[in-house]
Amino acid sequence: MVGLKPSDVPPPLGVKMMSAGAAACVADIVTFPLDTAKVRLQIQGEKKAVEGIRYRGVFGTISTMVRTEGPRSLYNGLVAGLQRQVCFASIRIGLYDNVKNFYTGGKDNPNVLIRILAGCTTGAMAVSFAQPTDVVKVRFQAQMNLSGVARRYNGTMQAYKQIFQNEGMRGLWKGTLPNITRNALVNCTELVTYDLIKEAILRHRLLSDNLPCHFVSAFGAGFVTTVIASPVDVVKTRYMNSPPGQYRSALNCAWTMMTKEGPTAFYKGFVPSFLRLGSWNVVMFVSFEQIKRAMMVSRQRIEVVN
């Protein structure tokens, strides 16, 4: 054990889950303004959306928010967002290799279908635990910090309490079906595409297995994931942010969008979604590898001392 490098020792499940949760929190802090801009663009066009302010493009939305609400508005819902990543990423990313090994019986080089199945499984499991944090995060990102405009929630814990009191347990798990669909798509597309792009780059010797390779793979995975998951993501955002009674179901929300705004409504906020997923993937995967490596080094040192 002493003579092995950290990369030679398979990290235990606890290390992978803690590394994934910590790396996702780092990525969320870096990319949260893009996520908030995405939410504002996605809900634009609803009757209940903010009147008198029009968002145009990613950076136009960010600029408008800073000008009208102050820079802190870009981080509305950050506490719930970090709570979400601790619950969510630690499961969907940290458990991915273990679930993949479970489906293959421990065999190496699983095929694409096994990888997709593992990604869908951990993505769906993660949503089941983290859904209330996602509901609160989206609602905080959607509300405006303007004088004269009533705020739905004043604090994270107060939001959980108020949603439970007004809407019951169903309110906290509102939008679970579209969110499971969205995150199963995101997880399997993100992880599988990252693996495939990275393997292709290394196989054709375009780049070595280092930061530039990880950057290209993660950014490419972010683009493919955004294209596939954006329609479900828009429906999820609108449905979770909607007050009781506005939509009968997630499918009714999607149908209302199609009939009133047309098919392009499903790709509202695409650019910030792409920028956010691409940059989030880069920060997360790089941080994940470094944190995991550091934890393995510390673990080996403790074992040597003992």
Image: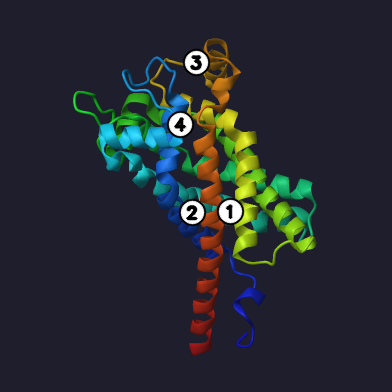
Q: Label 1 sits on what residue type?
A: Ile
Instruction: Tell me the residue at 53%/88% (across/down).
Output: 304
Q: Label 4 sits on what residue type?
A: Gly
User: Counting residues from the N terminus, which is met first, the one under dot 1 or under dot 4?
Assistant: 4
- Distance between the Cα atoms at labels 1 and 2? 9 Å
Instruction: Classify mark 3: residues with Cα within 10 Å, few (<14), some (14-19) or many (20+).
Output: few
- Mark 2 touching mark 3, by CB under 8 A? no
Q: Helix or strand or loop: what does disc 4 sit on?
A: loop
User: Counting residues from the N terminus, which is met first, the one under dot 1 or under dot 2?
Assistant: 2
Q: Label 2 sits on what residue type?
A: Ala
- Mark 3 touching mark 4, by CB under 8 A? no
Question: Relative to residue 114, is residue 295 depicted above or below?
Answer: below
- Distance between the Cα atoms at labels 1 and 4? 31 Å
Q: Disc 1 designates what residue?
A: 93
Instruction: Tell me the residue at 52%/56% (across/down).
Output: 284
Q: Disc 2 designates what residue?
A: 24
- Distance between the Cα atoms at labels 2 and 4? 25 Å
Q: Quadrant of residue 78?
A: top left
- Mark 1 touching mark 2, by CB under 8 A? yes
Q: Helix or strand or loop: what does disc 1 sit on?
A: loop
- Distance between the Cα atoms at labels 3 and 1? 33 Å
Query: Which of label 3 and label 4 is nearer to you?
Result: 4
- Mark 2 touching mark 4, by CB under 8 A? no
Q: Disc 3 designates what residue?
A: 248
- Distance between the Cα atoms at labels 2 and 3? 33 Å
